[in-house]
Image (cartoon, rainbow, N blue to C red):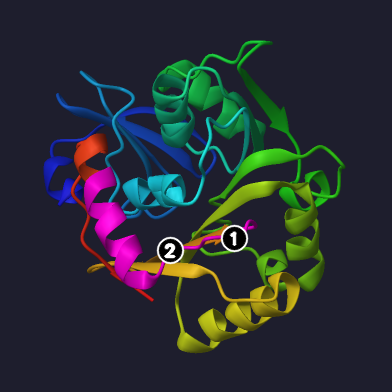
Amino acid sequence: MIIDQLYNPQLLAQRGKIKVFENNLFRWLCFEDEKIIQSCMLKEDPAKLNLPYQPFMMMWQLFFNRQPSSACLLGLGGGDMARYLGQQFPLVKLLVVEQDPDVAKLASEFFLLNPDQNKLTVEIADAKKFIQKKQQFDLIFIDIVIDNKPPDFLYTEDFWYNCHHKLASDGVMIFNMVTFSDKEFLTLLEILRKEFGRLPFCMSVTDHKNIVMLMPLDTNNQPTLAELKQRSILLQKKMNYRIKCVWR
């Protein structure tokens, strides 16, 4: 587990509740609870995904049949997903939405996140308000925590309605849900079923509270669960990641 490799931490920076640590191998970011790692960068390979749930969020490739041209990331952290997408899909225009300007500054200063006008933009904004804008994306990644838990607006119908209408017709929504109770999970599933007309594909991250949800808008020729499992094995080999999950 990655947490076992974050030994001998040295504090590099702190702004309020946000802290940046490093050791000889990794640099990582956490909020108030230092045991909960929000972002983690391998210093010799900055674009590598290190947190257990992150490779699961790349499973959108099982449903998307063309090269994506645009992606929106709600939630920045230390920029792990932005660095990976920027390296693996260099033609994709990335827009990252982050509410806290201190997080954006730390990501730029300590995590090699360098916004430019062409391929990567970081917008300081509230995700709930931003998602009401009309701009559309091929991919929408949602990975937001406030005080180490999902914000309340993730359980509102309006938020998911706006997410739905910001996706291209063949787009995919990717959502990292940290579950604390079955009730929360079932409530969210019912909201998603009502908005999208069906349930998302869900992957439980073994030994963690994360459930990564995938919602492709294009329902034509959707794979069966057995086909998804087989495709995911091939994709993992291509990505050089091995993930241990339960599809549901």
Please provide percent x and percent y for residue 14: 45, 32
Q: Is residue 111 visible?
A: yes
Where disc 1 sits, the SS reads loop
User: 27 or 190, which is in the foreground?
Assistant: 190
The residue lying at 19 percent from left, 49 percent from top is 3
Query: What is the secondary structure assignment of the residue under circle 2?
Result: loop
200 left or right of 47 in image: right
Q: Residue furthest bottom?
A: 183
**Mark 1 belongs to which amino acid?**
Asn
Pointer 2 residue: 223
Q: Position of residue 143 (x, y in %)?
A: 53, 51
- Residue 42 x, y percent position in the rendering: 24, 28
Q: Which sits in the foreground, 190 or 215?
A: 215
The residue beneath circle 1 is 220
Extreme front residue here?
Answer: 221
Q: Considering the image in quadrants, where does the C terminus appear? A: bottom left
Q: CA distance from mark 2 to mark 1?
A: 9 Å
Residue type pointed to by label 2 = Pro
Q: Residues within 10 Å of mark 1 (few under 14, many from 20)?
A: few
Q: Residue at x 54, y 58 (%)?
A: 147
